[in-house]
Amino acid sequence: MERKIIVLSGPSGVGKTTLYKRLLREFSSSLDFSISATTRPIRPGEKNGLDYYFIKEEEFIKKINLGEFVEWAKVHGHYYGTLKSEVERILANGKNCLLDVDVQGGLSIKKTMPGSILIFIFPPSFEELEKRIKERKSDTQEEIKIRLEQARKELELSKEYHYSIVNDELERAYAELKNLVMEIVRN
């Protein structure tokens, strides 16, 4: 059976992390998560090699120049990217590959990896998204403003995605995502 590459995207604060971590717990035998690389500072509670590969900007740029990324982008002043080696490792282990990337990255993967399935996670409303971002208390006012501007752009580009799910209520959104992923990996 052909292994699939499944891309989850959506604005910061929409609940992607909660959704994908639950998927990974439930489907650990057939689904693995591609850990992204980033130059942003590590947040409290995060672990290098588990949440992200935290690398210096010089190293990231070197990897870009060597063609080691499937996709990469500069978002909110920091580089983020998906290493080819990470996706290849997961597929070689016989698992489907789940990625959590921004919309730019998702659209790059759609072009460079035909057959990838893109799923966009929507907030119930822009007001609710703003509330969620502020409640995280991990961003400055300026960072919140930038995230909200980026969210508007991402919502506009979401029409390029194959599927969309509104995360208005976690249990309902998860059930919809779970059913969709089960359908994708079966085909």
Image (cartoon, grey):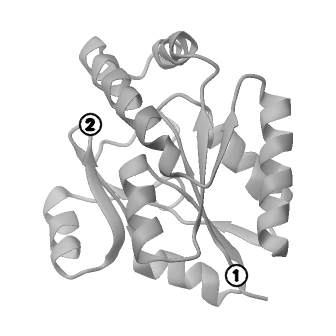
Indicate left or right for 140 with 125 as reference: left
Q: Is residue 179 above or below residue 152?
A: below
Q: Are marks 1 and 2 in contact (CB under 8 Å)?
A: no
Quarter of image, res 115: bottom right
Task: Pick the quarter of the image with the C terminus.
Answer: bottom right
Q: Amino acid at mark 1?
A: Arg
Q: Nearer the viewer, residue 46 or 57?
A: 57
In the rendered structure, find residue 3 and report the number of the disc placed on it: 1
Q: Nearer the viewer, mark 1 or mark 2?
A: 1
Q: Secondary structure at mark 2?
A: loop
Question: Is 4 left, or right, of 52 in this rendering?
Answer: right
Looking at numbered disc 2 in the image, what kind of residue is underneath it? His
Q: Secondary structure at mark 1?
A: loop
Residue named by callout 2: 76
Against 12, is 177 above or below?
A: below
Q: Position of residue 173 (x, y in %)?
A: 78, 35
Position of residue 49 measured from the top left corner of the image (x, y, whole percent): 48, 62
> Which is more toward the observer, 54 or 156?
156
How far across and how far down the image is residue 186, in percent? 85, 73
What residue is at 70 percent from the left and 48 percent from the top? 21
Categorize mark 1 by other alpha carbons within 10 Å: few (<14), some (14-19), many (20+): many
Toward which corner of the image does residue 24 lie, by quadrant? Answer: bottom right
Residue 53 shows in this picture: no
